[in-house]
Image: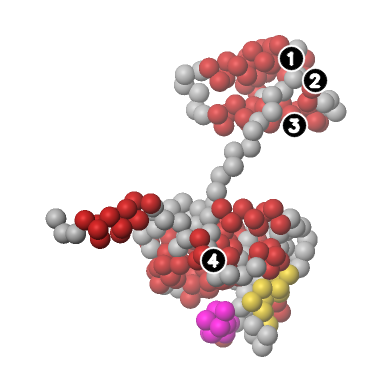
Amino acid sequence: MAALALHFGTLPTELDPEQVKDYLFELQQRSKTPSQTYFKHTVYGLRFLLKTEGLPYSFLHLPTIAKVKKLPVILSREEIWRMLQSAELLKHKLLIGLIYGCGLRCMEVRSIELQHLDFDRKMLHIVQGKGQKDRYVPLSEHLIRGLKTFINIENPERYLFNGNQNRNIEEIDVLSKDFDSRYSQRGVQWVIKTISKKAGITKEVHTHTLRHSYATHLLEDGVPIIMVQKLLGHERIESTMEYLHVCQLSDQQPHSPLDTVFTLCSRNAGPK
């Protein structure tokens, strides 16, 4: 908005629609423009400005921005295993295991309290997740063994993972904005990024990548999509159905037709 105001020497709300159209057209035509992202954020900025001024989008005839549909990055089970093997600290193994093994969001894994762990029923109670909704997810027996060991060693008082107890300088943790003792979002992200690189994974891996992989692998294991929706805490089934585009179901495993050509034709042709 500052660039737009400086370009015309006036407030954006004082421009007429034709001036805004010309400016946006110029952004798209610039040979050295960074990307379409700058154009989109200019439109988003104008929308926000109009909203704060109580004006409709039609006031400046702003163009619609088509939402780019991207499929999530999914890790294979072998890549998950490599990450678990590459994590040296038990704390890091548990972070990976909980995010992937329970399909947690970053905030949810940071907010786990001791009282949320039910080892007898092998369940984790996720309190006030996205959309202010509670849910229960199963806990792996492997996770339970590690969690019991970790709790005995670290003696956490409230939250399972606390900040400012790091052993690595690179993992300097910062307290959250609420100034509580939880492990910070940046700390969790650092762990996932660092260990995925250490495991030799070339894919772009974020904390949410493990959650995507959890949902996809459950569908591949034959878990009904309605159950996966509940485990993920999705309000709309459409959000869960996106994983159907990336999961490989056993009865319809995708393959290259070239493999079929080699299998059938090489058999008939005999050795050459």
State how far apart marks 2 and 1 are (Cα): 7 Å
Q: For the residues labelled 2 and 1, say whether their Cβ atoms are less than 8 Å apart.
A: yes
Among the two numbered marks 3 and 2 on one chain, the one whose residue lies closer to the N terminus = 3
To which residue does mark 2 refer?
59
Q: Is residue 160 visible?
A: yes
- The secondary structure type at the circle numbered 2 is helix
Q: Is residue 266 above or below residue 150?
A: above
The residue indicated by pointer 4 is 220
Q: Earlier in the sequence, mark 4 or mark 1?
A: 1
Q: For marks 2 and 4, give the CA distance.
A: 49 Å
Give the residue at x 78% y 26%.
Answer: 57
Label 1 environment density (alpha carbons within 10 Å; few <14, some 14–19, many ≥20) = some
Query: Which callout, 1 or 3, points at the residue further toward the start of the chain?
Result: 1
* Type of amino acid under label 3: Phe
Quarter-wise, where is residue 2 in the image?
top right
Q: Amino acid at mark 1?
A: Pro
Which residue does the numbered mark 3 point to in the structure image?
48
> Is there a contact, CB below 8 Å, between mark 1 and mark 3?
no
Camera-nearest label, 3 or 2? 2
Say if 234 sits above or below 167 in the image.
above
Viewer-side label of 4, 3:
4
